[in-house]
Image: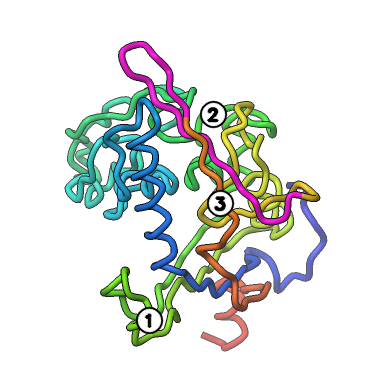
Amino acid sequence: MPPREAPEWAKHGSFLVFRRLRQDVSRFWRFMEDTATQLAANTPGFEALDAVQLASLLVGRWPSGAPVMRTPNTDSAALAATLPANHFGFDQPSRRIPFDPQTGIPPDALPLAPGDRDGFVCPHAAHIRKVNSRDITTDQGNSVDILQRRILRRCIPFGRVLEDRAHPETDPERGNRGLLFVSYQTSILDQFEFLAKNWMYKRQAPEENPGGHDLIVGQNADPGQRRKRTCTLRRKKNGQTFEATIEIEGDWVIPTGGGYFFTPSISTLKEVIGA
């Protein structure tokens, strides 16, 4: 991003985005269960699909946090707990990380990620792929250009876990649960808002393949289509390619508050308080 004029006290500071995101957990899992059952029964290539796998494909990660690129067929808490878990791209196969005696980080001995330019392992519209396409060339250029869109994200969950997803009427929280989202960036317009409006809200971006909208937090930026969002899943088995399109209109993640702020640097804060 081009440098902008700012007062001296703003040097090394960051812009902060805060969002309170209520999450309709019961509705989310009902959709996953119903859709996975329908696809498994009626769509060739998706016979073994279940609700957890479908949800993980749309996010790009299993419930443990393990990325589907590293473990496509099942969750792996062991992988999620390792530092190299996020060592993967979407275009080229990942390479083995050697042992580093200076940091003491052990070698990455778990299965590596394959190349997945066509989205057979992690869908083009998966949340993690929409907001960070890693080594894939996008409408903004190559992977170096993509780094300018990165944000530093920190989130805190609120509300108790929904114990009985099948009977939300017994929920003691009455649906009041979700995520307090915080992200830091040098430009809210060129980073946070760009990721939402240009990539998550559009079917055909950031990659050339129009994989669909980000169904987890995205909306539909096309006028006249209301809230309808679609996502295409692709599978490859025995040399054959299979596709399935998912369509939704409801929301699972609902913004209920938030704002844009500026956070001074630690050095500026120390100067102000005289530390």
Q: Residue at x 60, y 53 (%)?
A: 218
Q: Which SS does the magenta portion mostly show?
A: strand
Q: Residue furthest top?
A: 239
| Place of residue 256 in the rendered image (x, y in percent of width and height, measured from the top left) | 60, 77
Helix or strand or loop: what does disc 2 sit on? loop
Helix or strand or loop: what does disc 3 sit on? strand
**Residue 173 quadrant:** bottom left
Q: How many marks?
A: 3
Is residue 6 covered in magenta?
Answer: no
Q: Residue at x 70, y 46 (%)?
A: 198
Disc 2 or 3, which lies upstream in sequence? 2
Amino acid found under the numbered disc labelled 2: Ile
Range shown magenta: 225-243
Q: Horizontal placement of 84 versus 60: left or right? A: left
Disc 2 or 1, which lies upstream in sequence? 2
Query: Marks 1 and 3: CB-CB under 8 Å?
Result: no
Q: Residue at x 61, y 48 (%)?
A: 229
Viewer-closest of 131 and 141: 131
State the separation of the CA atoms marked 2 and 1.
44 Å
Amino acid found under the numbered disc labelled 1: Glu
Image mark for residue 248: 3
Disc 1 or 3, which lies upstream in sequence? 1
- The residue tagged 2 is 136
| Place of residue 94 in the rendered image (x, y in percent of width and height, measured from the top left) | 35, 27
Query: Marks 2 and 3: CB-CB under 8 Å?
Result: no
| Place of residue 151 in the rendered image (x, y in percent of width and height, measured from the top left) | 56, 54
Image mark for residue 262: none
State the separation of the CA atoms marked 1 and 3.
23 Å
